[in-house]
Image (cartoon, coloured by chain):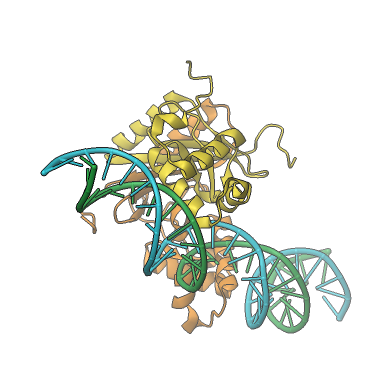
Chain colours: A orange, B yellow, C cyan, D green
Amino acid sequence: MTNSQSYNKKTNDYNLTKNQKIVFNLLQNSGEPLKAYAILENLKREGLKSPLQVYRALNKLVELGIIHKIESQNSFIACSNSNCASNTAFTICRRCGDVKEIKNNHLFEQVSDLGKKNRLKVHRFNLEFYVDCNGCKVN
Amino acid sequence: MTNSQSYNKKTNDYNLTKNQKIVFNLLQNSGEPLKAYAILENLKREGLKSPLQVYRALNKLVELGIIHKIESQNSFIACSNSNCASNTAFTICRRCGDVKEIKNNHLFEQVSDLGKKNRLKVHRFNLEFYVDCNGCKVN
DNA sequence: TGTATATTGTTATATTATTACATATCGTGA
DNA sequence: TCACGATATGTAATAATATAACAATATACA
């Protein structure tokens, strides 16, 4: 698999539990960021009944690094990188809010290097580029 | 003024209104991130009565680029850079939550360059390094 | 099997942020 | 100066996001 292809993590690879699995599958199939309460609505037919069930699954998936939280949107998106090591880099359109994960591994290295050069003990980083996206829905 | 010194923006420079001014002053004097409802508590003696008064002031100050929002903490901090152009770079301790704004202008340029190299029309960026801080309060 | 750990279910509640609408203030051009 | 548009304020209500607390189950594995 090359870097330019999208990389789909399998639920089986992580011994996910029932709730974790259905939340993760929804995020992978959706491909775009979803909010916790939207996930809950979506998964009521799968038996989810309370926000906490969703938040618990989301927290675990974030911990595993297989989904990421877009903090400025309170939304969650499946990771599409093979080796992000929980580092995150996104473009976020400032007009339509469209989010894309950046897959350029070179960029990840360069940002890590910036941390090192600044003598930081970086556990992970999050980089958000607020952009005008091409073919913006809102244009 | 050199880069290594802290840079305090003056409220007069921005024609701030009454509420904007007291919120901004509190953030500057505090030096650390504060949450909206903490600001409200703090400024009740100055006459603030509702969350909306705080949020409106915060939104304006963010727009002006003289404070920044730490999205992952829902908190706000006075900008300590002379020329961040609304770009933000922080270290956030993953244990104690301590936040510091990075003042290395070279880093800002390099991150901007990364955006350019990736052919992005970057309006602004936000970079968060999750670190283990020195002398962590929680250690 | 026994036991520690993690997960689930459920209710209640805390925290963060916005809508809606009435009123007041400020800047600027006629 | 005044009128009118834009911006800011005050206030109440409510929406959206997230966690606490506690009981019950399931799972891993010594």
Left or right: residue A64 versus residue A134 is right
Q: Looking at this view, is A5 or C9 the one in front?
A: C9
Rendered view: B113 above or below B59: above
The residue at 43%/30% (across/down) is B12
Residue A66, visible in the rendered structure = no
Q: Is residue A111 above or below residue A24?
A: above
Front in this rendered view, residue D14 or A3:
D14
Q: Position of residue A115 (x, y in %)?
A: 52, 32
Q: Is residue A40 visible?
A: yes
Q: In the image, is residue B66 above or below residue A33? A: above
Q: How many marks?
A: 0
Residue B32 x/y as whole percent: 60, 38
Give how far across and how far down residue A54 sits, in percent: 55, 70
Residue at 36% x, 54% y: name it. A99
Write the residue at 48% across / 30% down.
A114
How far across and how far down the image is residue A62, in percent? 54, 57
Q: Quadrant of the C terminus of chain B?
A: top right
